[in-house]
Amino acid sequence: MDLIFLEIYNVLWGSFNGIEKHAAVPVKNVLKVLIQHNLVEFSAKTPFSQPIYQANSRNIYFLIRLQRAFELIQQQLGLEARGIVEEIVCRGQLPMSKLLFICGWKQYDDDPNKSSLTHADVLKIVKKHSSTFEALAVNHYCCRTAQILYDPEDLVPQTTYNEAVKYTLPPVNVEVIATRIREENSDLSDFEDSLIGWKIDISNFYREWRDDIVTSALKRRYQNMVDNKIVRILASKTFTCSLEKGLPAESPWLTHRDIAQHLARFEDGEKTAAKLDEHLDIMLQDPKTVLSCESPDIGPYSLNYSAAMKHIMFDLVEHIILQRHGFFAARIFRLIRDKIYIEQDRIAEVGMIPSKEAKHLTFVLMHDNFIKMKEVRKTYNATAASNKIAFFFHIDINDVASALLEFSFRSMTNSHIRRNFEKYNFRMSLAKEERVTRIYNTVRGRGATTEQLQEIEDLITPPEKEVLKRARIYNDKLPLLLLPAAP
């Protein structure tokens, strides 16, 4: 599967025959699994009536942030919602009835007194999972998948998607699901929604993370001068943007009265609402212009997402440059950002940096794609000497973003390689610890004495315990996301 996915990812897109030729392995079942988990998409819009397969990079990047997504769901909707999301991720996409059956069956099977559970108790479990799934759909954390239309005359199946019912729940008979859980009958093919799949809607996760980044940054900037509830209200009232359209320039406009009404819903919001003008005035006077206003006295107000994210990104880049190349390099980057275009000699003069060091750090930043150089001729003569050409340094924000992504992916790859290397070095000690732990649990379950348990624990010598301690430290420093396999 790894070979086939890498082949699709490296060539960006390809046909079935082309992928099979390069991968040199059977690809039909593997492509089914990748499509099932939304890692590969197919399109039939080709003149040769053959499907074209393409890697879904956004879903791949989302898997990297999966643990953070689980924490967000648990924080907002509870532990049961997290379990439902984990189940959808493990299986890629599945009908609502099957999802309720799996989640209900797991809770029913884990109950030590499941033999005494009545039909009403199981029905209560299924209804609870159904209401939790409804909350996920209402909050746009999961959505319907595209339906596949099979036609015998078409060599490639067509897909259709109805945006109007994207988050609409189909009719599901929870009574029958509860009955089949007790009967241990997992056949749900006769349900009405058996052909309606559900998957994770990653766009809302990115919106929540974006709002959290903005509010956290503005909270650190204003500290106690501006109540964070006001920033949260301005950020949370934005619309859900699609990943294709990108980040909205501004959030929807809110009047002074709208903000005061939302503040009244908080426990101590009335105190903040009484001094709302002062809080908004502090944000309006901020030179970073994160708050837009049509009229300073009455509003309406809007959070300038474009300016806020731009400042956050530049602060992040400055911190990275400071850690990688030192204080002078961060000063050069900040100077180029303020001046927009600046020559090499002016960098050393204005930045008060030794000329030799300024030149070295400037080209180091250019090598890492943090800054760019532009040639400007002082004369129209194409054969002019080099002293007739001015070299200006500037910042291309798209190249900077690409550089940061490259650093992140390189760090993840290095962490993965280092983790496997350390795991290989400690494989003997880890295997022995696993065997001793298994023996310890077996003997303790049979009612062994304390002395016998202590003898089993002493099978691992103190030097081996130190090795295992070091292995755990490496394991914590080099985390790796491992998805549980779907049963």
Image: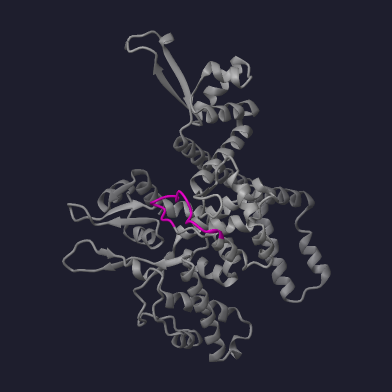
Q: In this figure, which colouring scheme has been used for the structure?
A: one colour
**Location of residue 364 with respect to 49 vertically, above or below:** above
**Location of residue 411 with respect to 149 vertically, above or below:** above
Q: Residue furthest left?
A: 153
Depth check: give the residue in front, 126 or 416: 126
Q: Position of residue 323 (x, y in %)?
A: 63, 34
Answer left or right for 261 relative to 136.
right
Q: Position of residue 247 (x, y in %)?
A: 45, 50
Q: Does 289 lie within the magenta span?
A: no
Q: Residue furthest front?
A: 297
Q: Main secondary structure of the magenta part?
A: loop
Q: Position of residue 5 (x, y in %)?
A: 39, 51
For the magenta stretch, what is the residue range? 241-256
Depth check: give the residue in front, 440 or 474: 474
Depth check: give the residue in front, 150 or 377: 377
Depth check: give the residue in front, 111 or 430: 111
Please give the name of the residue rendered at 44% of the width and 38% of the height, measured from the top-left corner: 398
Is residue 482 in view from this perspective?
Answer: no
Q: Residue furthest right?
A: 451
Please give the name of the residue rendered at 49% of the width and 55% of the height, measured from the top-left corner: 206
The quadrant the N terminus occupies is bottom left
Answer left or right for 235 relative to 113.
left
Answer left or right for 120 relative to 159.
right
Q: Quadrant of residue 155?
A: bottom left
Q: Position of residue 17 (x, y in %)?
A: 25, 51
Q: Quadrant of residue 69?
A: bottom right
Is residue 19 in view from this perspective?
Answer: yes
Please give the name of the residue rendered at 35% of the width and 81% of the height, measured from the top-left corner: 192
Number of numbered tags placed on the structure image = 0
**Location of residue 126 with respect to 450 vertically, above or below:** below
Q: Does 249 lie within the magenta span?
A: yes
